[in-house]
Amino acid sequence: MSRRHTDREFEAELAELRQRILLMAGRVEKMIALAMQALVEEDLELARTTIRRDDRVNQDEIEIDERCLLILARWQPMAFDLRFITHASKMGTDLERIGDMAVHICERVEDLYQSGYGGPFVRIPRMAEIVQEMLHDAVDAFVAEDVEQAEAVLRRDDEVDALYHDIFLGLLQRMSAGIEPVARCVAVQNIATYLERIGDHATNLAEQVIFVLRGRDVRHGGKRSPSDPPPVNSV
Amino acid sequence: MDPSNDKIRVEGLSAGFGDRRVLFDVSMALPARRVTAIIGPSGCGKSTFIRILNRMHELVRGAWASGEVHLDGVPIHGPGVDPVLLRRRVGMVFQKPNPFPHLSVRENVLAGLSLTGRRRRSEAEAVMERALAQAALWDEVRDRLDAPAGGLSGGQQQRLCIARALAVDPEVLLMDEPCSALDPIATARIEDLIHALCADYTIVIVTHSMQQAARVSHRTAFLLLGELVEHDDTDRLFTSPRDSRTEDYITGKFG
């Protein structure tokens, strides 16, 4: 929004909230990158220090929620501002969950290397690369107010799902054939699951960006029209 | 919107005072038994708009209006329409509570009735009690119906004015910033009343409070410099307006 609010205090509070979301997004992006580095470089210490970064991210979530509540109470925002405030809080929740996923990845890295299981990893880093791009693009779309960029993020979730499926099948085959220890396969499988979830949270973020920018709810195929038939209940 | 449900239909309405034009070609339909809020900055023509709906606008020297306003499909400016009878059907409540301060509560409620014909005393008492009850004021004033209205609180005075408007059994209630002189509790009472009254009446409310418009109305119209910029379901207009001028106004932007 290029036009400014008449009340500069309100403008400043919105700008600060926006800034906090961007900082938080930057922190979780970094956590995913470090978790992958710890995995690929077999760096246990890096895994541990990355886990500790989550405290700051958890704090971000609390502070963003607090700011959203205060802005709602003080200014009773409308239209774009109302959509932004209500979704800033949801964005904070998704970013916090991404932070948790990065922590879980680091924990599995610890499990792997403490048990003496190593790499190499090919598809996991590729999957991590895609979800990092998705997260980055969702945040970029928010900053640039670019709906098309946010929509492109939604389409990439299929790539993530396909890779996840590949990884799962590969691990299953190797476990069945007894080529690899089950413990290693389960840990790697878990990491793939965490990355897949990060992709889901990045998708949520992109959906939220679209809603904030356009007021259009694209979740779960969008809002049903009142004339649509009711969903069929499974018996 | 189902057109058969429109209580008032405004078509190509322009209006002004002498050389000054304050409304430009406004067209909109106001659904029956729904609350329509009119919002917009000072001087945008909100008050002129609603004053045209009961032909009070034309009482101002130099005032003029063109275009059509239909009430139940009948043009209100048509030949044979008596403005006094029209104002019984389309009542009005103003920004500042304006009871007759020296008249009693009872006399205030019945003031409109006395002007439009005599009633038997028992009938008048029934009308008064019904109007005060509808205005959610009966329980507070039943023991002081003969006390001067000037002794009531601001919020009570405004509800008394609403009772006075309801006593003549109108179909439409126009409210011109009815809460702007009231505290939050009195405001909540009036808003609660609006929610209840729209079961029977078509209500048009002018308000400077976006939050109030969002709370009480079903439809909202945004006027800017005499033009109707946007008219939509209230839920939609305050969450995702279609026009950037509406967006700027309701989010308090300039530039």
Image (spheres, grey):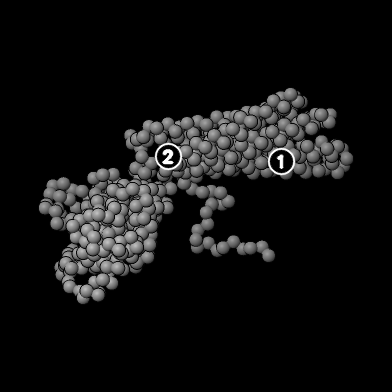
| In the foreground, A80 or B182 | B182
Between the residue at mark 2 and the residue at mark 1, the CA separation in whole angstroms equals 41 Å
Residue contact at pointers 2 and 1, CB within 8 angstroms: no
Labels 2 and 1 positioned on one and the same chain: yes
Question: What secondary structure is marked by label 2?
Answer: helix
Q: Which residue is mark 1?
A: A193
Chain of the residue displaying label 1:
A
**Where on the picture, by quarter, is residue B249?**
top left
What mark, if any, has residue A74 been given in the picture? 2
Give residue A106's position: percent from left, percent from top.
72, 31
Give residue B144's position: percent from left, percent from top.
27, 62
Question: What secondary structure is marked by label 1?
Answer: helix
Task: Please name the amino acid that badge 1 sits on.
Answer: Thr
Task: Please name the amino acid that badge 2 sits on.
Answer: Arg
Q: Is residue B23 above or below residue B79?
A: above
Q: Is residue A39 left or right of residue B33?
A: right
Residue in the image at 14% along x and 57% along y? B59
Give residue B238's position: percent from left, percent from top.
40, 48
Chain of the residue displaying label 2:
A
| In the foreground, B25 or B125 | B125
Residue in the image at 51% along x and 42% along y? A87
Does residue B117 appear anywhere in the picture?
yes
